[in-house]
Amino acid sequence: MRRISGCLAALAVVVFAAAAANPRPSGGTVTGKVTYTGTPAKQKVIDMSKEPSCAKQHATPITTETVLTGPSDSLENVVIYISAGTPDEGAPSQAARFEQKGCQYVPHLLAFQVNQPLEIVNDDQTSHNIHPLPRLNREWNRSQPPGSPAISEKYDKPEFILVKCNVHPWMRGYFAVMKNSHYTITGSDGGFKLPNLSPGKYTVSAWHESYGEQSQEVTISGSESQSVNFAFKVKEY
């Protein structure tokens, strides 16, 4: 009897270890890719000669980031998110970080949740004046000299917000304020993945700062993976 009990205990350990190494999916997944058709606008070279402390941080001149493309006609910096079908969520306590470095916004596009802390820092040797331009949230405009403390803010409504610097006109970025955690931003390959979706019907949306927004519906029935692709028709301007 003791031998059988010992074998059962050992088997339980093996089963537990296997389950830990290969956990069951907690929901379904939406995957896909964002591409473009047409000729995207050529990005403009930024002249930072009036800010030498910033210019020397770039080995070669940088360009604007309104349209970033990758191999096989992929489109970067597209926010992919669940716009309908899932409830709002409480915000994480960890702050989203937005940097001013080399007279650029890093990252160019920052996504975070409603009521999540936002921390804005100035890493440069020059002053910046950060000025988000929301339509639904409270507007503010604050100067940030070099070496000054981080600016701390929150937004209580979801929206996409243009951010500019009133000192350096080439500095442009975006805040994507999301109502839940089901979002991601495409990289240079245009690919995306939204995991951990409970069974149900969802609207998946893709937003780009220059090309607008598209949406598609998808149904998740279990732990399967559904494919959704987006293609933006663009033209040079």
Image (spheres, rainbow, N blue to C red):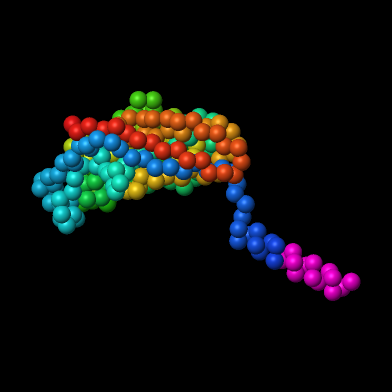
Residue drawn at (74%, 64%) of the image = 12
Q: Is residue 10 magenta?
A: yes
Outermost residue toward the right in this view: 1
Rendered location of residue 58, percent (x, y): 18, 54
**Snapshot quadrant of residue 208:** top left
Which region shows up in magenta?
1-13
Q: Is residue 167 magenta?
A: no
Is residue 72 shown left or right of residue 228? left
Instruction: Tell me if residue 187 can be seen.
Output: yes
Rendered location of residue 188, percent (x, y): 32, 48
Rendered location of residue 107, percent (x, y): 32, 46
Instruction: Tell me if residue 164 can be seen.
Output: no
Outermost residue toward the bottom in this view: 3
Q: Nearer the viewer, residue 235 or 122?
A: 235
- Note whether 215 is above or below 5 in the view shown: above
Residue drawn at (78%, 67%) of the image = 9
Is residue 177 shown left or right of residue 55? right
Residue drawn at (42%, 44%) of the image = 192
Is residue 72 shown left or right of residue 86? left
Rendered location of residue 4, percent (x, y): 84, 70
Outermost residue toward the left in this view: 49
Q: Quadrant of the C terminus?
A: top left
Main SS type for the magenta part? helix
Q: Nearer the viewer, residue 110 or 75?
A: 75
**Snapshot quadrant of residue 15:** bottom right
